[in-house]
Amino acid sequence: MRSFKLLSVLVFTILVSACKHDAVVKEVTNRVNDELSKTKYGQYIPKTNPYDNQATATAIPDEKSCLANLYNKKEPLLGDALRYKSERLCFNGFVVLYSGISKTPMWSAELLTKSRIEQARQMKRVDNFHEETRLSDDVRSRLSDYTQTGYDRGHLSPNADMPNSASQFDSFSLANIAPQDPQLNRGEWSSIESNVRKMVMKYGDAYVVTGTGFVGKNIKRLKGNVMVPTYFYKAVYFPKTNQSFGYIAENTANGTVQKTDVKSINKLLGINTVSYTHLTLPTIYSV
């Protein structure tokens, strides 16, 4: 135990001495601390994934796999105010832009395919909401932020889209979660998610961007910490047929849920959800 700690401290010292910038030093410190937290008496302890009967280490996807969830490998465009203190996070099966201001994802993007949906249908849901440890303490949302608030922990990239245990586990990270009205989450929004999967089975592969919108001056915060979106949206593009559609929903029990086009979402929320929205696209709304 003592020799392991001495070795870890030595590695830490060498890495820090090679760094010339405070941001790099912070990154090295976080990584070393993370590795130390994975050990017990000098032995690596892999993360336990509740979807498997054995302990597994959840690997972070590489950049290529991450960008594959974005059409033309381009992120949705946000203004400077919305991008401030934000961080892109890669997960198995989707990619997120997380805001340290709202402490929610601004958007989550995924590439849905027929084979992925067929695999996802075979997966049994096991809830495992967890805090995202890759985020620093000052911007991270907490499980306690959501308790007894009256809001659901609403997925952006839904659990039912996830084809394997690693992606299902990742979908329950709070970096993919935002406060959502229970009636919306369990009612119309759930139906929207299901309808998108049905459309993929009919029309083929689709790039899906699901996001949050904050409109108005009086934005609620859960326990003074996590901001409550005023809107949720979903923008879907089918590259094979060059067709798109979208949904936008008020985040209230009896709020309006609209089927719409992608440009209307962008105009209302002041964003550019996908790089193809400057085109004039035919729009489809249902299977």
Image (cartoon, grey):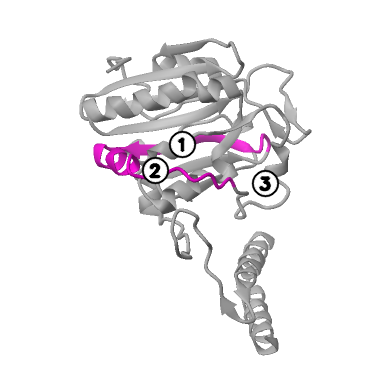
Which residue appears farthest toward the bottom when viewing the image?
3
Q: In the figure, is residue 84 to the left or right of 90?
A: right
Mark 2 residue type? Met
Residue at 72% across, 18% down: 217
Give the Cα distance between marks 2 and 3. Answer: 24 Å
* Residue named by callout 3: 140
Q: Are marks 2 and 3 in contact (CB under 8 Å)?
A: no
Q: Can the viewer see residue 83 in this picture?
A: no
Between 212 and 195, the one lying in front of the other is: 195
Query: Where does the C terminus fall, quadrant-wise?
Result: top left
Classify 106 as above or below 172.
above
Residue 186 placement (x, y as % from top left) = 52, 25
Q: Nearer the viewer, mark 2 or mark 1?
A: 2
Is residue 242 placed above or below 286 in the rendered structure? below
Whether tag 3 and tag 1 are in contact, CB under 8 A, the answer is no
The disc at residue 157 is 1
Residue 102 in magenta stretch:
yes
**277 displayed left or right of 255:** left
Residues at discs 2 and 1 in contact (Cβ within 8 Å): yes
Residue occupying image coordinates x 62% and y 66% = 34
Q: Quadrant of the N terminus?
A: bottom right
Stretch in magenta: 101-129
Residue beneath the point at 53% across and 30% down = 78
Which residue bears the numbered disc 2? 162
**Mark 3 → mark 1, Cα distance in angstroms:** 19 Å
Q: Residues within 10 Å of mark 1 (few under 14, many from 20)?
A: many
Q: Amino acid at mark 3?
A: Arg
Q: Position of residue 23 (x, y in %)?
A: 66, 59
Instruction: Examine the rendered structure and indicate whether residue 232 appears above or below residue 254.
Output: below
